[in-house]
Amino acid sequence: MKKEEYNGLVKDIGNLLENGRSHAFFALNSIIAETYWNIGKRIVEFEQEGKNRAEYGSALLERVSHDLKLNYKRGFSRRNLSDMRRFYMLYKNWQTLSAKLGWSHYAELICIENNEERAFYEKQCLEEGWSIRDLRRQIRSKLFYRLPAAKKEGGFLKLACEGHNVRKAEDIIKDPYVLEFLKLPSSYSEKQLEDRIISNLQMFLLELGKGFSFVARQFRMQIGRKQFYADLVFYNKLLRCYVLIDLKVKGGYSGVGQMNLYLNYFKSHVNLKEDNEPIGIILLKEGKGIEVKYALGGVSSRIFASKYMLNLPSLEDLRKAAGINVVKLR
């Protein structure tokens, strides 16, 4: 027996095992979700059979929890039963639920009070294949409120119905960007910021959003007798263009002209025939002050400046940082 043939056999068996485990995991998750939905349905039906039962409320869940624990031990706390009940109340038609999402995803989604916000995260989970960890992080970082559509009239409803569509340059921009995963000290340099981003590249790509892939750091450009370096370069396959990111710990308005230089270089020397014009994003620690606004006036419409934050924001933080009109949704 040839070694290559044997190695191929072992590899094929390994692939079959991995595929089998993956399918088993998704099947089990789906079965658990359906079981918990049915438990929630049964509790609601029991409550609604008569006025007296409907008044049980928390007392009913406490009693059911106690009795189930006697036979089934773990997994049936009052809170878990309450989540199952809420799961059914929010998704009364089982056919509307996706088999691609398991109970763990829905356990996060049902904690969201706002209907539009919940619908948005559910849609993005399906479109982008978010893990539980990804979903939890995007909810906590208030992604729903940081997208460009959130600042427009009717934007929340549009996000809920359509999700995050990327059709033009401004669609990929967030303001602010949330980089809590970098865990930087109170004082740091631009190099430290860049190093931490590279060390946490997967999380940074999640924050950038749909369609991004990493290209290079400190991309060298020879312009005349001088050498210039773009901090970070990515490619967005949805917009079919390079995205250059400049990191600023202090100031920022001086980086606008420099970014314009970089974009012109990419158009002339890096872009292929099928590539669209590159996009430049300047990430600012202090936010987009009046100097930056004036510096951006009259330059390429494909240069953007956004504040970055190193902590998970509250809705009030977002309102102050980017002027987002945060309203109470239904």
Image (cartoon, rainbow, N blue to C red):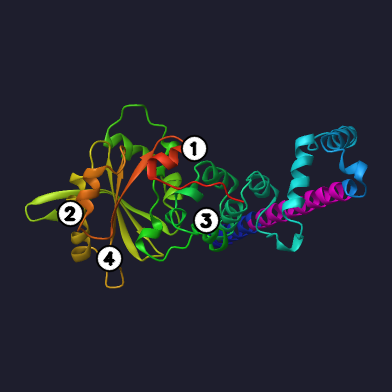
Give the label, 4 or 1, closer to the camera: 1
In the picture, the quarter occupied by the N terminus is: bottom right
Q: Which residue is mark 1?
A: 314
Q: Are marks 4 and 3 in contact (CB under 8 Å)?
A: no
What residue does disc 4 label? 277
Q: How many marks?
A: 4
Q: Nearer the viewer, residue 143 or 238?
A: 143
Residue at x-position 57% and y-position 62%: 161
Residue 138 versus residue 125 in the image, above or below: above
Closer to the eye: label 2 or 3: 3
Looking at marks 3 and 1 on the same chain, the residue that comes earlier in the sequence is marked by: 3
Residue bearing the label numbered 2:
221
Q: Residue at x 18, y 65 (%)?
A: 268
Secondary structure state at the residue bearing disc 2: strand
| Badge 4 or badge 1: first in the primary sequence | 4
Callout 1, which amino acid?
Ser
Front label number (4 vs 2): 4
Above or below residue 78? Residue 217 is below
Q: What residue occupies the far bottom of the structure in this picture?
A: 273
Residue type indicated by callout 2: Met
Q: Is residue 281 left or right of residue 116?
A: left
| Amino acid at pointer 4 | Glu
On the image, the x and y values in percent for residue 232 come to 30, 49
Q: Nearer the viewer, mark 2 or mark 1?
A: 1
Q: For the residue marked with disc 3, what is the amino acid?
A: Phe
| Residue 261, quarter of picture | bottom left
Q: Write the residue at 39% across / 47% down.
A: 175
- Report the span colored magenta: 19-45
Q: Position of residue 72 (x, y in %)?
A: 86, 37
The answer to whether mark 2 and mark 1 are in CB contact below 8 A is no
Which of the pair 292/189 is nearer the observer?
292
